[in-house]
Image: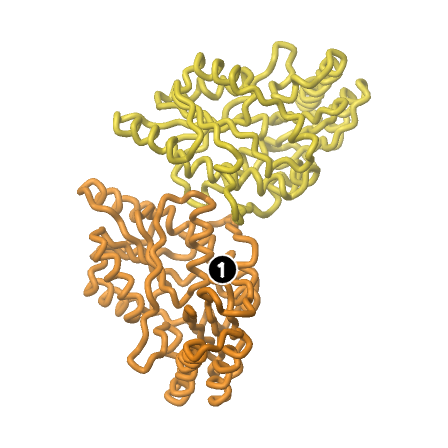
Chain colours: A yellow, B orange
């Protein structure tokens, strides 16, 4: 496995792989790797390509300075995990490589898919940052496929829209949310939870489960299903930033779950902001 | 020469050319071809590539509905001119191919280079439209080089910035403004000038000449040089939308021309909006 720092080096590596007849898969990450990231690498390997992992803590998608500072950075251990999982090249650029002097371009995805949920709570700049950095990463690597976790369901939607709209020749492959044995969705942010906070955070997957159970028991009203989920959060004194049942394509709120709907949750547990979601299928 | 309508067909043509070992040059146009466009094709041919010309009257860069409607469309004669000049493929997509249902993405270049001159007079949406459509055209074709006329100097600046920022792997090749024998910069809009308007429009190249002459005579003050140019316009009763002497990289106004500066003019002659520019070199 090689680690490259510049777009030019990355292109050389990818060109070499293509010259050897390989297809190319990309797993964009912000590092602080956990089994969720590695499941994306496994998916990429299963598709039999040369696997590029990017590690870049993108400053422009953070809307809170403390959150950016607190985001874990651990390149040496990340590299060991990536190599063991079968990554061929890590692309770990500096911020100056990604955003050189005079950088002035933003890729903006408009409409409900960026305005709702994370867009509403983290601000419009968040998805501008995501769409811009992902378009740059994809154009730097030009992979055949790029793998994203469904934990960030809205990100998958925004990136897919951006890729389709601009015509970036890549297939976006959404991969199932990876969970710890206790049900908590894997996230680099989990490392910042105290033991007590982690126990309380389990209310999030319980809330998803309670919603699914309510639906299974015949409840179709979104409000009632939200209340069932909300009770689990309240039991641990957690206040949701949002707890929404929405159309999976538009993210507009739905009143009745008579077609697959997305239940999306954002919660702050202590200082740590966690998100999770599940598709509710009637 | 072939005419293709879809991005998929274009990619097939380009892939075929690359398989034959060709490099690829692209000349993006809005059709209504004149010798200025053809000089871009000649430049592309001189670089020995396979030449793709796009013809697409991009609705999103027009900020006035009448201007969009009045823009000349003449595909059959354009195709004949392009073929004679040596174009290999014309890419002439429909608006629905470029902006399918649900399209929601904008490529925005911020800062002074989009805010000044055309950005100020035509509105911010103009360069959003340009940056978005050019990024789509480049990503559809993935040429080695793309050729743009320096008549649209600000467009060259914005496109170059966008390409550099996003890392689109293409070299932008600016080409000298093509002029009729009387000095008028070639433009598809010239066809809409009456005979009398055309005669008055010659005040624009005369204004550029007067500015250069003032500078050559030792005048360095931008205001005095602007006045020399403005007198030529006034003599034909033309009122400039802007007549600006600016830094060629930032488009910020300069007070003294002690380094190369861009003199940029926008004028309405009757209903027709014309732009032109020249670099003033002390």
On screen, B136 above or below A221? below
Residue on which disc 1 sits: B60
**Residue nearest the observer in this picture, B11 or A251:** B11
Task: Assess disc 1: are there few (<14), some (14-19) or many (≥20) residues with their C-alpha within 10 Å of its C-alpha.
Answer: some
Out of B233 and B241, give the one closest to the viewer.
B233
Q: Quadrant of the N terminus of chain B?
A: bottom left
Q: Residue, x 36% and y 64% (percent of image)?
A: B149
In the image, what residue occupies the spot 60% across and 18% down? A186
Q: Is residue B48 above or below residue B29?
A: above
Quadrant for the C terminus of chain B, please.
Answer: bottom left
In the current view of this chain or complex, which residue is farthest to the top? A181
Quarter of the view holding residue A124? top right
Element type where label 1 sits in the image: helix
> Is A213 situated left or right of B60 in this image?
right
The chain containing the residue under callout 1 comes to B
Residue depicted at x 47% and y 82% = B269
Q: Position of residue B203 (x, y in %)?
A: 42, 84
Q: Residue A52, position in %: x, y?
A: 41, 25
């Amino acid at each position: 496995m090689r680690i490259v720092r510049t777009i030019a080096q990355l292109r050389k590596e990818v060109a070499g792989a293509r010259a050897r007849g390989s297809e190319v898969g990309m797993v964009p990450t912000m590092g602080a790797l956990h089994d969720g990231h590695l499941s994306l690498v496994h998916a990429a390997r299963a598709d039999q390509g040369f696997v590029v992992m990017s590690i870049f803590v993108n400053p422009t998608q953070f809307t809170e300075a403390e959150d950016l500072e607190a985001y874990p950075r651990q390149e040496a251990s990340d590299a060991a995990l990536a190599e063991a999982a079968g990554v061929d090249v890590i692309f770990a650029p500096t911020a100056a490589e990604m955003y050189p002097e005079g950088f002035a371009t933003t890729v903006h995805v408009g409409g409900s898919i960026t305005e709702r949920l994370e867009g509403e709570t983290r601000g419009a700049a968040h998805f501008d940052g995501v769409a811009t950095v992902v378009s740059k990463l994809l154009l730097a690597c030009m992979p055949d496929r790029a793998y994203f976790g469904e934990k960030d369901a809205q990100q998958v939607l925004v990136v897919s829209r951006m890729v389709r709209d601009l015509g970036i020749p890549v297939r976006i492959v959404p991969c199932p949310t990876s969970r710890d044995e206790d049900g908590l969705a894997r996230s680099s942010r989990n490392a910042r939870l105290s033991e007590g906070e982690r126990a309380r955070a389990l209310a999030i997957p319980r809330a998803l489960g309670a919603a699914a159970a309510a639906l299974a028991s015949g409840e179709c009203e979104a409000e009632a299903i939200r209340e069932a989920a909300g009770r689990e959060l309240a039991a641990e004194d957690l206040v949701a930033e949002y707890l929404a049942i929405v159309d999976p394509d538009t993210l507009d709120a739905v009143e009745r779950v008579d077609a697959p709907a997305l239940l999306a949750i954002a919660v702050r547990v202590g200082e740590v902001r966690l998100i999770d979601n599940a598709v509710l299928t009637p």
